[in-house]
Image: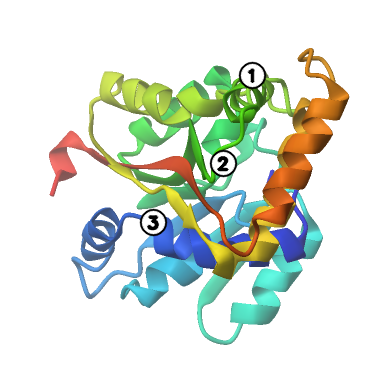
Amino acid sequence: MSGFSINWLDLREPADRAARDHLLAKQLVDYLQADADISPVVVDLGSGTGSTLRALTALGAHQCVWRLVDHDPALLNEALRRHGQQEIIEDYEADLLEIDALPLGAAKLLSASALYDLVSRDVVDGLVERIARQSTALYAALNYDGRTHWSPAHPLDDTVLQAFNLDQQRDKGMGPALGPQSAAYLSTSLESAGYSVQLADSAWHLGPEHALLVADLVSGIKAAVSDNYGLDSQLLDDWKAFRLSHLHDGHCVIGHLDVLAFPEKKSQ
C-alpha cells in the first residue's frame, strides 16, 4: 500500500510532520482521549514505518491500540522495531483493495498519511461505506492537491507540473488514482455518508535544509513525466539540472490537504 522505501519515508517525515495541520491533529487527539477508561483502536492504512503513529503520539495520543496495515512486511517490521516496546501495536500485512477483509472492527479511527491521492474513487467509496456502518472517524493527512511553486522560477515549471498532475492520476495498482482531486472527492464521499468534514492546508514548505528531499523529489518528477506527455527530453534535462543547481538556495511549496471527519452524532 505504501510501496516506498524506508529511506524515502524517513527523508520526507520531517517535512510531513511540519506540514500537518496541528489544529486538526490536536482536535483528533482530544477525540481519541475523550474517555480515559477506553483504549481507542486506530487503524492506520499504508502505515509504512509508523509516521502517523509518531505524529499523533507526539501530540498526546496515548494508550491507543494501533493496527498498522501495509502490504510491505519490511515496513511493518521496521515499525515494530521502532515502537514495539512503547505502544500497543498490531501489524497486518494486507491488500487495500480487499476492503471487506481489512481489520476495521471496533476501530474508533481510520487514519492514513499520503495515501488517498494514490487510490481510486471505488476504494474511497468502499472504505467510507464500511466505516460509516460502524461510526468510525477518519483522518487523512497530506493528500497531494496539485499545487507546486518553485523559487527561483524556470520557464518549464508549469508544463512539468501539468504533466506531473496528469501522471498522478494513472493507475498505480489501486485503480485510476484520484491524484490532486483526492481530498475533494474524499470529503464529498464522507459528507454523503453523513460525516462532518473539515479540511486544512498541509503544504510542504521546502528550503535548503531539505536539499536531499528536494533532490529526490526533482528526480522523481522528472522520471514521472519523461514519457507519455510530449515533453522535449533536452528541455526536461535542463529543467532538472536547473532545479538541482538551486538545492541550496531555492525553495518550493508542494500543496497538500488534511481531512478530518467525524460521524455526525460524534461531532466535536
Kindly identify which residue carries mark 2.
115
Residue 201: image quadrant is: top left
Height in image: 209 above or below 20?
below
Q: Where's the N terminus, which quadrant?
A: top right
**In this image, 70 relative to 147: left or right?**
right
Compare residues 173 and 108 and report the one nearer the observer: 173
Residue 63 seen by the camera: no
Whichever of callouts 3 and 2 sits on the residue coming sooner in the sequence is 3
- Label disc, if present, on residue 140 of the rendered structure: none
Whichever of callouts 1 and 3 sits on the residue coming sooner in the sequence is 3
Instruction: Describe the element under mark 2 as helix, strand or loop.
Output: loop
The crowd level at tag 3 (other Cα within 10 Å; few <14, some 14-19, many 20+) is many
**In this image, 178 relative to 95: left or right?**
left
Instruction: Describe the element under mark 1 as helix, strand or loop.
Output: helix
Question: Which numbered disc, 2 or 1, marks the residue closer to the eye?
Answer: 1
Residue displayed at 70% across by 79% down: 81
**In this image, 97 relative to 59: left or right?**
right
Kindly identify which residue carries mark 1.
166
Q: Amino acid at mark 1?
A: Leu
Height in image: 150 above or below 37?
above
Q: Position of residue 6 (x, y in %)?
A: 74, 64
Q: Position of residue 74 (x, y in %)?
A: 80, 63
Residue displayed at 65% across by 37% down: 96
- Label disc, if present, on residue 20 of the rendered structure: 3
Height in image: 226 above or below 49?
above
* Cα–Cα gap, marks 3 and 2: 14 Å
